[in-house]
């Protein structure tokens, strides 16, 4: 049987040559694709908001975020350098919410430590900027400081109740922000390792994970954080669950369950039915990447899975790294040492098929941070690697598309 292979196109952030990461990529309420062109390793680096222009098949650079929130890159403080898993689209008013994260050093320093500069008013990060971008007018409607001194690791919108939820870094606090009153509430610390996403269930409960891979849940009916006694699936040959936090989560089209990948080597896939039982039902779907020697350390940047997204055909797509390994994956000389593979998972059979390989002409492309589908049904994947980075488009076959393929829309980063 001939393997199906989809066409892919690479779009580099050529107008932002300092861009060293694209952590956030999302479809907007307008059905178009938005990406964060981040410069977190560059002194004075900032993030630019980018949108894919489908009619012209190119990227449009919408604005420099530091200018929109009055926090100049040359202020001497840590900069508004990135949007980190923190796009949240609002369908009823066309607003795309976004929040910033820290790590970019001041313009005159080589690096930034949030702990070292916490009490330094001239150097410390001003705080995660929350920005409301009106996709109908292409104007910034308003902005606020979401979390003083800290970055926003990930963001979620409960549109029905007008609430944003966030995890802060470095303290890993759970934050609730009321969009009507513009007031925040801090429910305290979860742990030392941030999960990389939150998700919402039909009962308006917000779910994430703790350091050791336990589900953590905020139930508005109880008004507090709750911890599951059970650990999520992981490889017991490699670790005991520590650092097995959510990396990416995608909701099934019928919203009955979510599919998740974890942020530890080796990354693991699972399916979670949050409405079943006291702590939901968790199905172990096994490792996301290739076999490897469990006695040898592997970087999370090499052994990685992300970009979970459901397409118009009702199948789950995601990016997983593949690399040359003498025993388990002897890639031939025609292959690069490592590459990013796009897989299709059938929710009914759990069968996985390789459908595309992400090809960056000049560098490796094994690290996918986020994925999205536009209104036309094509897929997009964000890339992290040598600068300037960019995004990939995977052109879906006509028979696998449908109108408004982005709906129901993903509401978390």
Image (tube, grey):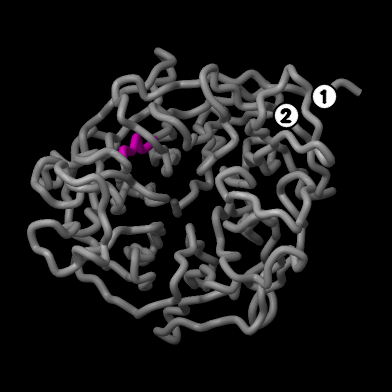
Q: Depth check: 217 or 45 in front? A: 45
Q: Position of residue 84 (x, y in %)?
A: 38, 49
- Residue 173 position by quadrant: bottom left
- Under tag 2, what secondary structure? strand
Residue 38 on the magenta span: yes
Q: Which image quarter is the N terminus in?
A: top right
What label sits on residue 3 in the rendered view? Answer: 1
- Under tag 1, what secondary structure? loop
- Identified at 32% across, 23% down, the residue is 60
- Residue 140 position by quadrant: top left
Q: Depth check: 225 or 265 in front? A: 265
Q: CA distance from mark 2 to mark 1?
A: 7 Å
Is residue 80 at all visible to an observer of this figure? yes
Q: Residue furthest right?
A: 1
- Identified at 22% across, 54% down, the residue is 129
Dominant SS of magenta comes to strand
Q: Position of residue 264 (x, y in %)?
A: 60, 58
In the image, the segment drawn in magenta is 35-39
Horizontal side of 307 relative to 11 (left or right) equals right
Residue 8 on the magenta span: no
- Identified at 65% across, 70% down, the residue is 241
The residue identified by callout 2 is 355
**Crowding at mark 2 (Cα within 10 Å: few <14, some 14-19, many 20+):** some
* Disc 2 + disc 1, Cβ < 8 Å: yes
Q: Earlier in the sequence, mark 2 or mark 1?
A: 1
Horizontal side of 223 relative to 215 (left or right) equals left
Is residue 68 at all visible to an observer of this figure? no
- Identified at 64% across, 46% down, the residue is 303
Q: Position of residue 270 (x, y in %)?
A: 70, 59
């Amino acid at each position: 049987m001939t393997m199906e292979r989809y066409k892919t196109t690479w779009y580099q952030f050529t107008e932002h040559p300092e861009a060293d990461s694209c952590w956030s990529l999302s479809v907007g309420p307008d059905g178009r694709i938005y990406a964060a062109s981040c410069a977190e390793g560059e002194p004075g680096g900032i993030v630019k908001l980018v949108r894919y222009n489908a009619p012209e098949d190119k990227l449009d650079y919408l604005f420099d975020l530091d200018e929109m929130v009055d926090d100049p890159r040359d202020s001497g403080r840590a900069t508004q350098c990135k949007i980190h898993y923190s796009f949240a689209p609002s369908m009823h008013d066309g607003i795309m919410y976004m929040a910033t994260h820290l790590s970019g050093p001041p313009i005159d320093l080589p690096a930034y430590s949030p702990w070292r500069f916490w009490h330094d008013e001239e150097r410390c990060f001003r705080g995660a900027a929350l920005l409301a971008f009106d996709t109908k007018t292409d104007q910034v409607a308003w902005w606020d400081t979401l979390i003083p001194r800290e970055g926003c690791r990930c963001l979620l919108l409960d549109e029905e109740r007008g609430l944003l939820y966030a995890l802060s870094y470095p303290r890993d606090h759970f934050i609730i922000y009321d969009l009507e009153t513009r007031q925040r509430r801090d429910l305290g610390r979860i742990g030392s390792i941030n999960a990389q996403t939150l998700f919402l269930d039909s009962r308006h409960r917000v779910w994430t994970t703790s350091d050791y891979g336990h589900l953590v849940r905020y139930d508005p009916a109880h008004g507090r954080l709750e911890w599951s006694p059970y650990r999520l699936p992981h490889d017991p040959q490699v670790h005991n669950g520590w650092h097995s936090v959510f990396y990416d989560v995608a909701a099934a089209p019928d919203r009955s369950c979510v599919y998740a990948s974890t942020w530890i080597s080796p990354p693991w896939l699972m399916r979670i039915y949050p409405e079943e039982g006291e702590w939901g039902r968790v199905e172990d779907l096994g490792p996301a990447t290739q076999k490897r020697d469990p006695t040898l350390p592997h970087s999370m940047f090499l052994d990685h899975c992300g970009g979970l997204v459901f397409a118009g055909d009702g199948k789950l797509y995601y990016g997983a790294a593949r690399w040359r390994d003498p025993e388990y994956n002897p890639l031939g000389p025609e292959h690069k040492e490592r590459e990013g593979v796009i897989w299709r998972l059938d929710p009914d059979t759990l069968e996985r098929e390789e459908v595309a390989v992400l090809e960056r002409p000049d560098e490796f492309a094994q690290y996918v941070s986020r994925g999205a589908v536009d209104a036309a049904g094509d897929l997009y994947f964000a890339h992290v690697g040598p600068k300037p980075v960019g995004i990939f488009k995977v052109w879906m076959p006509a028979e696998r598309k449908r109108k408004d393929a982005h709906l129901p829309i993903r509401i978390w980063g």
